[in-house]
Structure formats: structure tokens, C-alpha cells
Image (cartoon, rainbow, N blue to C red):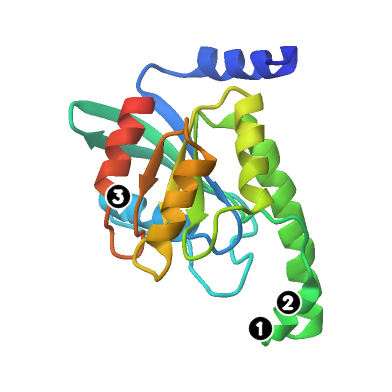
Amino acid sequence: MATSSSKSNWFSRWISRKRNDAKIGFFGETNAGKTTLANHFSLDYTGKKMGSVSEIPHETRTIEKLEQVNFHIDDTSLELTLMDMPGIASSVDFQEFIRMGIPREDALVRAREATRGIIEAIRSITEVDLGLIVVDLSKAPFDQVNLTILGNLEANKVPCIIVGNKMDLPGAKENSELLDQIFPDMSIILISALDGKGVKELYSKIAEVV
């Protein structure tokens, strides 16, 4: 059941929107491929990337925004704001950065920034009109982070699409079947953000939902 706060958040978003604009948030755990997908989206419609991609976790530690994206597909045209969120995690360990070759002092700074970024991402759920939950299908999709993101989006009455990413990697097909079992009532689109497979179908689903 929706709380009065979540109803208020939904109404505030709705009343402040123009009929043809929307804010889309890219949510997910670290290294799920959010920035790769956001860059693909941005390149398709603006010709430029949104952010840098790295194997080091928490590379995106603040929300990256790209406004006035003229999105058009099928019979739909929208003015979008893309919001690439910091990766969400249940904890941040500065030792993980050290293991990736980052000096201790810099690792501590990154850990503090990553923690603030997680808080910022969760708080920003109330700002978006559509949440894309990017799930890494190279591993089983049982991560608590995905359930937490979905729960927060649903509590705030934010429509969402689950984006099963990395379909180009081994094990993805089996894990995509698990995704269907875990979230049988959700909109799920399978993609490879790296090579663009399935991304057009995602665009069509975004137009349908928004």
C-alpha cells in the first residue's frame, strides 16, 4: 500500500512535468553496465558520451545528468533528462580499491565519495519518472541490491523497467530465465549495452511506459 509520502512524491513529479518530457534514472549495482548503457543512449541521440567506464567499482560516484535529449522512436518524441546513478552497494570497502592498484589515501577518498554517491542515488529515486534497473546477467540475479532498488521505486510509485544486461557473456541466457522467474510481473528487456543488441527494443519499451 502506498504511503502518503509516496503519493505526494508521485503527484509532485506528475504536476511538475510537461507532457513531453521525462527524467530517466539508470540504477543498479556496481559494474552492472549502467554507464555503458547511458553512453549508448546518449551517443544515439546526442552524439556524445555521458561518462567514463572502468573495471574499477564505483567509477561513477556522483549523478551524471544529460538534459534536453531529443528522444524519438516509433511515433513517440520526448525531451529526456538522462541520470546515470552511482552504483548501489550494501557496503563500500576501501581495500577493494587498493586491490585494484589505487594508493591507500586515494582509496579512502574514493570510498567516502562512493558512500555519498549511494545515498544520493537512493534519494534521487523520488526525482525520476522512469527507473531502469540494470542487472548484470553474467551472474545470478539474486543480489539484494536489485531488490532494494525495485522496492524503493515501487514505494515511490515510479514506473520501472528491468534491463538484463551483458547478454553477450557466458551464462547470461540461463540467468535471464532466472530473471523472469524472480520478477514475473515486471517489464524485462534483455540487452548487450556493449554491442547494442536489444537496445532498440528497450527504447520502444521506454516510449511505451513513459
> Which residue bears the numbered disc 1?
100
Residue 72 pos. (x, y %): 24, 35
The quadrant of the image that shows the C terminus is: top left
Q: Residue at x 64, y 37 (%)?
A: 124
Query: Which amino acid type is marked by label 3?
Result: Val
Q: Type of residue at label 1?
A: Met
Cβ atoms at labels 1 and 3 below 8 Å apart: no
Extreme residue in the left direction: 74
Which of 149/55 is in front? 149
Whole-angstrom CA distance, mark 1 to mark 2, is 7 Å
Residue denoted by label 3: 199
Whether pointer 1 and pointer 2 mark residues with C-beta atoms closer than 8 Å, the reply is yes
Q: Nearer the viewer, residue 163 or 70?
A: 163
Q: Is residue 104 above or below residue 190?
A: below
- Residue 197's x, y, as percent? 27, 57
Q: Identify residue for label 2.
A: 96
- Indicate left or right for 209 with 94 as reference: left
Badge 1: residue crowd in 10 Å (few <14, some 14–19, many ≥20): few
